[in-house]
Amino acid sequence: MHRLLKRQIRKYLSEDEQEKFRDFLDVINDAYVDFDSDIKQIENILEESSQELFNVNRELKKNLESKSAEAKTTSSRLEAIVDNINEVIFQANIEGEWMYLNPAWTKMTGFDLLSSIGTNVYEFVHPDDIELCRLKLKYLLEHKEKTNHFEVRFVTKSGSYKWCEIEERLIIGEDGKATGLSGFIKDISQRKSLEEEKNETDEKFRMIFEKSSVAYLIIKESRFLDCNQACLDLFGVKYRSNFIGKFVKDFSPEFQADGSRSSDKAMDFIYQAREKGFNKFDWIHMKEDGMEFPVEVILNPVQLAEGNIHFVALNDLSERKRVESELIAAKEKAEGATKAKAQFLSTMSHEIRTPMNAVIGVTHLLSENDPREDQLSNLNILKLSADNLMTLINDILDFSKIEAGKIELEKIDFNFRNFISNVTAGFFMKAKEKDLEFIVEIDPKIPAHLTGDPTRLSQIITNLCCNAIKFTDEGRVLLKADFKGGSDDKVNIQFEINDTGIGIPADKKDQIFESFSQADSNTTRLYGGTGLGLAITGKLIELMQGSIDVESEAGKGTSFFVNVSLKISLKSQPKLSFSDRHFTGCEKLKGMHVLVAEDNPMNVLIIKQFLKKWDVTYDIAKNGKIAFEKVQEADYDMVLMDLQMPEMDGYDASENIRKLEGEKYQELPIIAVTASAFNEIRAKVMSAGMTDFVTKPINPEELYVKLEKYAN
């Protein structure tokens, strides 16, 4: 029997009663057994379910712990991200109180984060911007827009204001009503500052652009995009709308000065500017009224986001062109005046030298005819005066030639030592007259034969030596030629002219090389001279590509240092030998027959005297026409042809002689006798067919050299 049933039967039934109800009890016992069986089964099921629930619970707990850890990590990360965002993230209720602010708020404004929460937003907004904030919120509420975007100023803890950019959106509750705002605030004060600076800079540049007196123009391709007022004034345009949008061709003539089409040439210049990065050129533009005017155009390409443009500066050349035209006219006028002056000097040279030729020539002749002592003294005075006058005339003529750029240096061979001997021959006597010692020292290393222009070199040394003697009253004058090195075909020579004379004050050293200037205003009165000697000397040295320096002390003397470079020649040989009073070796001229074409009787007389001394026979022709006839009637070894004669001058006579048939007329030496040594006269002489020339007043040595040169 089931234990539970047995316990109850014993408690409530006797044995008899148990026997009496045995069948009933058996039925109950079977029910208890069945119930126990069901309970056992349920217990098993419950036990299995409990185990399953335990396992599920354990897994859920694990998952919950994992998700909680992940959520905590994510939250930490999000918090770290929010805390480190530079923009302020905010939430505010609909009444305008801060509900949430991230730490960027403190960084931006300096206000404490916790104390700011719960305060009204408008407490931190610039008073002038509060109304804007309200209008933006009102618009957001009325139009149900998603976001607002605007700029306001927020106050900082220090009392200053920062420009900020706000982006805000509505927070909508479950009932569909707005409960607040969220969004972010970005500090744009630096950007605003830069924008203000940019705007100020743009305004400054715009003002400079607009107010500049220089015409500025901005073009794209060849179309006008913008310009300043000066540009409009330059083109004579009253309204900007009549200029902007037009093209270069619209304000240019159809063709430029070189004949090219303006539209094509403009694009060409623009392309060149783009290639080179810059282009500058002259252009002919046209005003609105059609008047043409020249401009200087400066093109500068500029690369912008919207494409390439060119910044153009325009300079009006009208005034410059006018001045240039006036200068050209003035230059032509000056050249005409210079030409007239040269012609005048040429004529005056002839007119002055002709009588001087007579004076000097007769003085030579008289001094060689054994004059009395008193006559010799007068002749010396006459000769000295004539030489001084010729020096003055030569200085003026040489200076005029140098000014006009008409001097060309010769390149001929000469014996250097003979050259120095000939140049200094007269200085010994001049020095002796003033009881001075004249010393010449030549460096033996200087080659004997050189190539250059001995005439101009002689002029340089003569000017400096004459000055040294003129301005020295006691002591000595030294001429020294030093070898200063060189190359295989050139030698560098330094000439030193040293004296113990009056010297030159330190503040006057530069002045002495100026035209018509001397170191002291009394110099001309005391010593004479034109003040051109050193000016001419300096110019001649410059032509020779040399240099001149001066060292001096007032009252103690002066030293001039002339440095020149001359070519070395081994071919030149001495041609003449002269004694102090007479020529030697004149046999070469004996037997020559010469035609003298000269209309001045005194010049004829002097030439005749010299020719007689050299046993040279001669005929006289009073003009070019007679000379032309005589050349055809007799055989002459040479013709001395004056240039300025009546009926037919020397140029025409020479040309006519050269036109005659026969070899002798082509080879006959014709020597021009001229008072002018200008280059244009020399060129004219040669183009007329003449062989060579001698200058007036006739120097017997020069005449002898020419006769000997063409004797055969």
Image (cartoon, grey):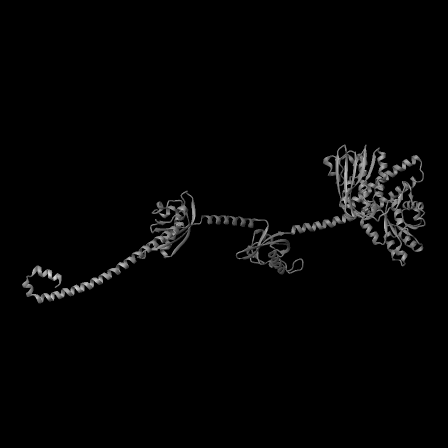
Q: Quadrant of residue 655?
A: bottom right
Give residue 271's position: percent from left, percent from top: 61, 58
Q: In this view, does 610 lie above or below 526?
A: below
Give residue 246's position: percent from left, percent from top: 57, 58
Residue furthest left as drawn: 16
Left or right, 205 with respect to 669, comes to left
Q: Is residue 660 above or below residue 570?
A: below
Left or right, 529 with respect to 588, comes to left
In depth, the one of 390 and 546 nearer the eye is: 546
Inspect this view and state whether residue 291 appears: no
At x 94% / y 38%, what residue is drawn?
A: 370
In depth, the one of 473 and 217 nearer the eye is: 473
Q: Is residue 635 above or below residue 29?
A: above
Inspect this view and state whether residue 702 appears: yes
Left or right, 572 with respect to 221, comes to right
Number of labelled discs? 0
Q: In which quarter of the image is the N terminus?
A: bottom left
Give residue 401's position: percent from left, percent from top: 79, 46
In depth, the one of 277 and 245 nearer the eye is: 277
Q: Is residue 95 above or below residue 56?
A: above
Give residue 585's position: percent from left, percent from top: 92, 45
